[in-house]
Amino acid sequence: MTCTEYKFSISEMSRTQGMRMIAASLVLIVLAFLTSVAVHFRDDLADLAIKWAMRREPDLIIGSPRDPYMHRHFVIPKNRLFNIYLHRIMRDDDDRALHDHPWWSIGMIIRNHYFDIVPRIKTLFRKYGSGDLMAVRRDEWSITFRRAIDMHRIVLPGPGKQEAWTLFMTGPEVRDWGFWCPAGWRSSRVFGEKLDRASVVGRGCS
């Protein structure tokens, strides 16, 4: 290769690398713009969902109607296969026990954040009914997948205990669900009871 050919090759490589850098920069600018638009768009959607829920009665009140823990709104008609709920979480979960679920679920926080209290070692907690717990922060727009057997307890951020809103999707019921009391697992049918459109604490862990 002659010196002229070598210089030409270097020049072509530099030009190619420059074009790639320009293209990569343009892609990053477009992605940044789309991300910014998406953030504003999702916040607008969250505002619309919350306004929709606030204008209607909840489909289910969890906790005492006078001091509810949560309002549940059915986004689609309730059915046996797949459901979408809008949850308004107004206070902490019952602090006497962690609970599991009757179905797998996917939860997305659309307003505020909360803390998930979960076992540090799940297998040991299931085996002995107790164990070390830890708090996992769930931020706004975070997504959490839970199996039916996964146990947790929600705690709102303090000291004002700001309420949180979540979009909550579930599959079909696959098991009975309940609470992990100090004396062992207790079915929700024993721990609590339903009154009309409200779900209130019954015997609890006692």
Image (cartoon, rainbow, N blue to C red):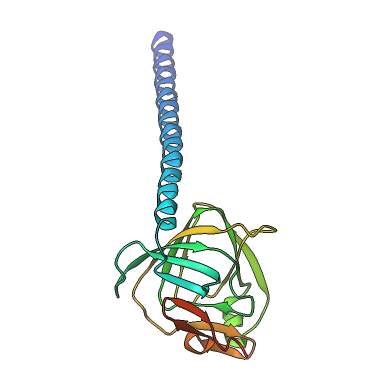
Whole-percent x, y for residue 4 in the image: 41, 8
The front one of 203 and 20 is 203
**Residue at x-position 40% and y-position 75%:** 103
Quadrant in the picture for the C terminus: bottom right
Q: In the rendered image of this protein, does residue 50 appear above or below residue 14?
A: below
Location of residue 29 by image quarter: top left
**141 relative position to 27: left or right:** right
**Residue at x-position 58% and y-position 71%:** 93
Q: In the rendered image of this protein, does residue 29 appear above or below residue 5?
A: below
Outermost residue, top side: 4
Whole-percent x, y for residue 27 in the image: 40, 30
**141 relative position to 55: left or right:** right
**Residue at x-position 51% and y-position 68%:** 70
Outermost residue, right side: 159
Location of residue 180 by image quarter: bottom right
Quadrant in the picture for the N terminus: top left
Whole-percent x, y for residue 132 in the image: 68, 76
Q: In the rendered image of this protein, does residue 159 appear above or below residue 128?
A: above
Instruction: Count all numbered tags in the image, as a single digit.
Output: 0
**16 relative position to 200: left or right:** left
The front one of 64 and 86 is 64
Location of residue 122 by image quarter: bottom right
The front one of 110 and 126 is 110
Whole-percent x, y for residue 44 in the image: 42, 43
